[in-house]
Image: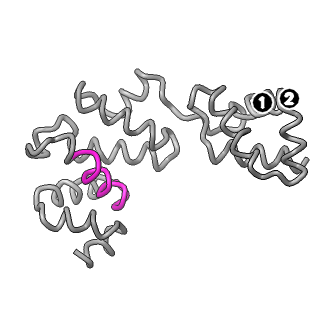
Amino acid sequence: AEALAQRLGVAAMVARVLDEDAAALAYVEAAIAAGAAPAAAANSVVNELLPAAKGAALSTLSLDPVGLAALVNLVTKGEISTKQAKEVLAECLTSGEAPAAVVKRLGLSQLSDDASLKPLVDAVLAEHQDKLSELRGGNVRLMGFLVGQVLKRSGGRANPSRVQALVEEAARA
Protein backbone atom coordinates (compact mmCIF):
# COMPACT_ATOMS: atom_id res chain seq x y z
CA ALA A 1 0.00 0.00 0.00
CA GLU A 2 2.92 2.34 0.71
CA ALA A 3 4.31 1.99 -2.83
CA LEU A 4 0.82 2.54 -4.22
CA ALA A 5 0.39 5.68 -2.08
CA GLN A 6 3.64 7.07 -3.46
CA ARG A 7 2.86 6.12 -7.06
CA LEU A 8 -0.58 7.72 -6.99
CA GLY A 9 0.34 10.60 -4.67
CA VAL A 10 -2.42 9.82 -2.17
CA ALA A 11 -2.78 9.35 1.59
CA ALA A 12 -1.98 5.94 3.04
CA MET A 13 -5.65 5.36 3.91
CA VAL A 14 -6.75 5.84 0.28
CA ALA A 15 -3.96 3.54 -0.94
CA ARG A 16 -4.97 0.86 1.61
CA VAL A 17 -8.57 0.87 0.35
CA LEU A 18 -7.38 0.48 -3.24
CA ASP A 19 -4.82 -2.16 -2.25
CA GLU A 20 -7.64 -4.24 -0.75
CA ASP A 21 -10.10 -3.70 -3.62
CA ALA A 22 -8.73 -4.88 -6.97
CA ALA A 23 -11.81 -3.71 -8.89
CA ALA A 24 -11.55 -0.19 -7.45
CA LEU A 25 -7.84 -0.08 -8.28
CA ALA A 26 -8.59 -1.24 -11.84
CA TYR A 27 -11.20 1.54 -12.13
CA VAL A 28 -8.62 4.11 -10.96
CA GLU A 29 -6.01 2.76 -13.40
CA ALA A 30 -8.55 2.98 -16.25
CA ALA A 31 -9.38 6.60 -15.32
CA ILE A 32 -5.66 7.43 -15.26
CA ALA A 33 -5.22 5.77 -18.66
CA ALA A 34 -8.07 8.02 -19.90
CA GLY A 35 -6.11 11.09 -18.79
CA ALA A 36 -7.12 11.71 -15.15
CA ALA A 37 -4.57 12.96 -12.62
CA PRO A 38 -3.69 9.87 -10.50
CA ALA A 39 -4.35 11.39 -7.05
CA ALA A 40 -7.63 13.00 -8.13
CA ALA A 41 -8.88 9.74 -9.69
CA ALA A 42 -7.91 7.67 -6.64
CA ASN A 43 -9.44 10.11 -4.17
CA SER A 44 -12.66 10.36 -6.20
CA VAL A 45 -13.05 6.58 -6.36
CA VAL A 46 -12.40 6.03 -2.66
CA ASN A 47 -14.24 9.07 -1.26
CA GLU A 48 -17.10 9.47 -3.73
CA LEU A 49 -17.71 6.46 -5.96
CA LEU A 50 -17.28 3.57 -3.50
CA PRO A 51 -19.76 5.17 -1.04
CA ALA A 52 -22.15 5.90 -3.94
CA ALA A 53 -21.97 2.26 -5.06
CA LYS A 54 -23.09 1.16 -1.56
CA GLY A 55 -21.24 -2.14 -1.76
CA ALA A 56 -22.17 -2.88 -5.39
CA ALA A 57 -19.52 -3.18 -8.09
CA LEU A 58 -18.26 0.14 -9.48
CA SER A 59 -19.16 -1.18 -12.94
CA THR A 60 -22.83 -0.88 -11.94
CA LEU A 61 -22.48 2.92 -11.65
CA SER A 62 -23.51 5.05 -14.61
CA LEU A 63 -20.13 6.85 -14.57
CA ASP A 64 -17.35 4.84 -16.19
CA PRO A 65 -13.59 5.51 -15.77
CA VAL A 66 -13.56 7.68 -18.92
CA GLY A 67 -16.38 9.79 -17.45
CA LEU A 68 -14.49 10.09 -14.17
CA ALA A 69 -11.39 11.24 -16.07
CA ALA A 70 -13.51 13.88 -17.84
CA LEU A 71 -14.89 15.09 -14.50
CA VAL A 72 -11.44 15.20 -12.86
CA ASN A 73 -10.10 17.16 -15.84
CA LEU A 74 -12.89 19.75 -15.58
CA VAL A 75 -11.64 20.46 -12.04
CA THR A 76 -7.95 20.35 -13.03
CA LYS A 77 -8.55 22.87 -15.83
CA GLY A 78 -10.42 25.17 -13.41
CA GLU A 79 -13.70 24.91 -15.33
CA ILE A 80 -15.54 23.79 -12.19
CA SER A 81 -14.63 23.86 -8.50
CA THR A 82 -14.21 20.75 -6.34
CA LYS A 83 -17.50 21.65 -4.66
CA GLN A 84 -19.24 21.84 -8.05
CA ALA A 85 -17.60 18.53 -9.01
CA LYS A 86 -19.45 16.78 -6.17
CA GLU A 87 -22.73 18.16 -7.51
CA VAL A 88 -21.85 17.12 -11.08
CA LEU A 89 -20.82 13.64 -9.90
CA ALA A 90 -24.11 13.13 -8.06
CA GLU A 91 -26.01 14.25 -11.15
CA CYS A 92 -23.96 11.99 -13.46
CA LEU A 93 -24.69 9.02 -11.21
CA THR A 94 -28.45 9.64 -11.30
CA SER A 95 -28.89 10.86 -14.89
CA GLY A 96 -26.17 8.88 -16.64
CA GLU A 97 -25.11 12.01 -18.53
CA ALA A 98 -21.50 12.90 -19.29
CA PRO A 99 -19.90 15.39 -16.87
CA ALA A 100 -19.55 18.16 -19.49
CA ALA A 101 -23.25 17.82 -20.39
CA VAL A 102 -24.25 18.12 -16.72
CA VAL A 103 -22.04 21.19 -16.25
CA LYS A 104 -23.65 22.82 -19.29
CA ARG A 105 -27.22 21.87 -18.31
CA LEU A 106 -26.82 23.13 -14.73
CA GLY A 107 -24.86 26.23 -15.77
CA LEU A 108 -22.06 25.38 -13.37
CA SER A 109 -18.96 26.52 -15.19
CA GLN A 110 -16.60 28.43 -12.94
CA LEU A 111 -15.75 32.04 -13.74
CA SER A 112 -11.98 32.29 -13.96
CA ASP A 113 -11.35 34.99 -16.53
CA ASP A 114 -10.57 38.50 -15.34
CA ALA A 115 -13.10 40.02 -17.76
CA SER A 116 -15.91 38.25 -15.86
CA LEU A 117 -14.42 38.62 -12.37
CA LYS A 118 -13.11 42.19 -12.35
CA PRO A 119 -16.57 43.87 -12.48
CA LEU A 120 -17.74 41.67 -9.56
CA VAL A 121 -14.62 42.49 -7.53
CA ASP A 122 -14.91 46.20 -8.32
CA ALA A 123 -18.58 46.27 -7.28
CA VAL A 124 -17.89 44.52 -3.96
CA LEU A 125 -14.90 46.77 -3.20
CA ALA A 126 -16.97 49.87 -4.01
CA GLU A 127 -19.65 48.67 -1.57
CA HIS A 128 -17.13 47.88 1.15
CA GLN A 129 -14.56 50.68 0.88
CA ASP A 130 -14.23 50.71 4.69
CA LYS A 131 -13.20 47.04 4.67
CA LEU A 132 -10.79 47.64 1.78
CA SER A 133 -9.17 50.48 3.80
CA GLU A 134 -8.83 48.18 6.82
CA LEU A 135 -7.31 45.48 4.59
CA ARG A 136 -4.81 48.02 3.26
CA GLY A 137 -4.11 48.97 6.89
CA GLY A 138 -3.01 45.41 7.62
CA ASN A 139 -6.21 43.64 8.73
CA VAL A 140 -5.64 40.54 6.58
CA ARG A 141 -8.71 38.78 8.03
CA LEU A 142 -10.84 41.01 5.82
CA MET A 143 -9.48 39.26 2.71
CA GLY A 144 -11.74 36.29 3.43
CA PHE A 145 -14.74 38.56 3.91
CA LEU A 146 -14.19 40.41 0.63
CA VAL A 147 -13.50 37.23 -1.35
CA GLY A 148 -16.63 35.70 0.19
CA GLN A 149 -18.73 38.68 -0.89
CA VAL A 150 -17.51 38.30 -4.48
CA LEU A 151 -18.24 34.56 -4.42
CA LYS A 152 -21.72 35.28 -3.08
CA ARG A 153 -22.35 37.88 -5.79
CA SER A 154 -21.24 35.37 -8.47
CA GLY A 155 -23.63 32.72 -7.19
CA GLY A 156 -20.65 30.61 -6.13
CA ARG A 157 -19.29 30.44 -9.67
CA ALA A 158 -16.22 32.67 -9.23
CA ASN A 159 -12.82 30.99 -8.96
CA PRO A 160 -11.79 31.78 -5.34
CA SER A 161 -8.03 31.88 -5.93
CA ARG A 162 -8.42 34.22 -8.91
CA VAL A 163 -10.80 36.47 -6.91
CA GLN A 164 -8.28 36.63 -4.06
CA ALA A 165 -5.52 37.64 -6.51
CA LEU A 166 -7.74 40.45 -7.88
CA VAL A 167 -8.64 41.68 -4.38
CA GLU A 168 -4.94 41.63 -3.39
CA GLU A 169 -4.14 43.60 -6.54
CA ALA A 170 -6.80 46.19 -5.70
CA ALA A 171 -5.57 46.44 -2.09
CA ARG A 172 -2.05 47.27 -3.33
CA ALA A 173 -3.31 49.90 -5.78
Left or right of 108? Residue 89 is: left
Examine the structure image and report whether residue 108 is included in the region drawn in magenta. Answer: no
Residue nearer the viewer, 96 or 168 = 168
Where is residue 21, by image quadrant?
Answer: bottom left
Residue identifier under label 2: 126
Q: Are marks 2 and 1 in contact (CB under 8 Å)?
A: yes
Q: SS class of the residue under badge 1?
A: helix
**Residue for point 45% across, 39% down:** 83
Q: Which amino acid type is shown beneath numbered disc 2?
A: Ala
Where is residue 115, by image quadrant?
Answer: top right
Q: Position of residue 60 (x, y in %)?
A: 10, 39
The quadrant of the rendering that contains the N terminus is bottom left
Q: Main secondary structure of the magenta part?
A: helix
- Residue 4's tag is none
**Residue for point 29% across, 58% down:** 42
Residue that extends furthest to the top in the rendered view of this protein: 105
Examine the structure image and report whether residue 46 is included in the region drawn in magenta. Answer: yes
Q: Position of residue 140 (x, y in %)?
A: 78, 52
Residue nearer the viewer, 85 or 109 = 85
What residue range appears in magenta?
A: 36-49
**Residue for point 90% across, 42% down:** 133
In the image, residue 76 sits, relative to residue 151, either above or below, namely: below
Residue that extends furthest to the bottom in the rendered view of this protein: 3
Residue identifier under label 1: 124
Where is residue 170, by image quadrant?
Answer: top right
